[in-house]
Amino acid sequence: MASSAYATPFNRGIDFSKPVFILLAAILAVLVLFPLFWLLLYAFTDPARQFTLMNFVKLVSDPAMRRSFGLAIGMAALVGVLACAIATPMAWLVARTDLPYARFVRILVTASFVTPPFLGAIAWEILAAPNSGIFNILYRVLFDRPTDDYLFNIYSFAGLVFAIACYTFPYVFTLVANALDRVPSDLEDASAILGAKWLTTLSRVTLPMVVPAMLAGALIAILQALTMFGSPAILALPAGFHVITTKIWSLFQFPPKLELAAAAAIPLLILTILLLRGQKWILGRKGYTVLGGKSGAPRVTELGKFKPLALLFVFGILCLTVIFPYAALIKTAFTETIDASISWDSFTLKHLNFVLFDFSATRLALFNTLLLGVLTATVCTAISLVVSYLVARKSVMGAGILGVLATAPVAIPGIVLGVGLFLSYANPTFKLYGTLWILLIAFMTIEMPAGYQQLSSAFQGVHPELEEASRILGASRLKALWQITAPMLRTSVVATWCFVFIGTIRELSATILLTTANTKLVSVIIYDLNESGDLGAISVLGLMLMVVSFFVVYIASKMPLGAGRLQPRG
């Protein structure tokens, strides 16, 4: 029964819902709309702030800019195809066969998912650089080849596609594996009863039902590749070519061409929106509908004599995406040089000592990274909690606007947001460039969609009846949220905090445009050290970043499930 039947405005306490709604709407509008306004202003004006389309004319007429767009689109498309080719069979083997160690495989795929792509690119730089790569060194030693000969060259277009696919295929794997887990066995059993072999059932029954998930995952992989800065900057620039994200970054080098950078960001923003709309449309389609009651458990295919081959395939993928890169980082962190043999004689702690004691910039970067990670995760989670509550409970007219604003940044690539924030806050009015405030604003904007979507989903599973009881007893809406609903969502709140924290400490695309000497973060220090070739220090910093990430994930996984979780109503 509604709380209004029992309570009056005098015994329910003061309701701050409307003031909080107005405050949150203002905050989210500033976070999202303000940088977009300045981006559009610079894109469509000249330095005198007069309207013009010449910035776009210059983009179209510049062969280097056209080439960077073309290479970025081609690279992203190939990443999507390769990610699907890797992830789809791997997901089927893990989810629908008797493959040994399937749970362990899922854990390692998660490790690949958590790894920052730019760190993975550096790991493959250690492994497959033409001259100094470990694989090429082994090749020359084992086959007695000349010193200028090499087997792999990661500094190439193909190398870039491969390195990015290694850290985007988990998106496809996760969606396809989850879809396979949900596919009922009824149709597969019917196919088997009618005499179809397992391969026929797989190709004509199972896979068609997970194609939407595979295509949606491919679009996410394409989007990630298209908007990524770190891996292309590390691998494409030494190869002598730009993609659009690195080209936008180059426009900020002296002398800066801010109007061109803003104009170049607009097509990338439009492509991102189109890809996200395509993914939503694909996931929104109903490929099949289960009628009737509870379906049977997923049908498990026995691999039989193909089991060793399946294990070899899965282990090979894990080696390329997790085992080899992490092994390369660990070896480089604790040996004198990349080509040093693994022995006690070559073991050293000089890179660790350099990072922690000799190089003062890393200590400042570590402090800034952890501080911004904690602040962003705390503020984002708190705002997402209140926004999700107001939207889910429809407690204020127009609350849905908050959901739109909180989700909107997902369509803004990091490099585009970095351009918008630089134009917004580097001007004399705000003077935030060179401070941690501009980075906090950037991280809050980037991570807000993830925080909101996770907590919004959690609210759907909590019935409002206890909140109504609290309101009857005189609590305001926000007090009911704080004392009743939030404790029941403890697990989701902690998971959201951890997710936002990890996303913050690994961000590079927007960060690279917004940091100065006093506001460097670990991700930017890693990028700077890569340009100077100090791979030992990079490996130490990268491993420290991963240890922090996995520790946060471990703590989150050990959190007890919400003790006050409500049972579904009968």
Image (spheres, grey):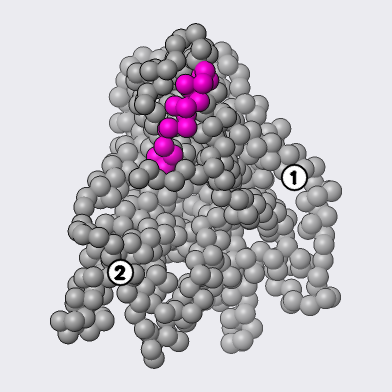
Estimate the spatial distance between the alpha carbons at disc 1 and disc 2, rounded to whole Å. Answer: 55 Å
Q: For the residues carrying marks 1 and 2, which lies nearer the camera in this image? A: 2
**Furthest-front residue in this view:** 6
Determine if the magenta segment contains residue 327.
Answer: no
Using the rendered image of the protein, determine whether residue 262 is visible from the camera's viewpoint. no
As helix, strand or loop, the secondary structure at mark 2 comes to: loop
Please, what is the three-letter code of the amino acid marked with disc 1?
Answer: Thr
Tell me the residue that label 1 is attached to: 362
Please, what is the three-letter code of the amino acid marked with disc 2?
Answer: Gly
Residue at 82% over, 62% down = 349
Residue at 35% over, 77% down = 300
Quadrant assignment for the C terminus: top left
Q: Is residue 181 above or below residue 516?
A: below
Residue nearest the observer in this picture, 432 or 263:
432
Q: Mark 1 or mark 2: name the one nearer the start of the chain.
A: 2
The quarter of the picture where residue 25 lies is top left
Count of residue discs: 2
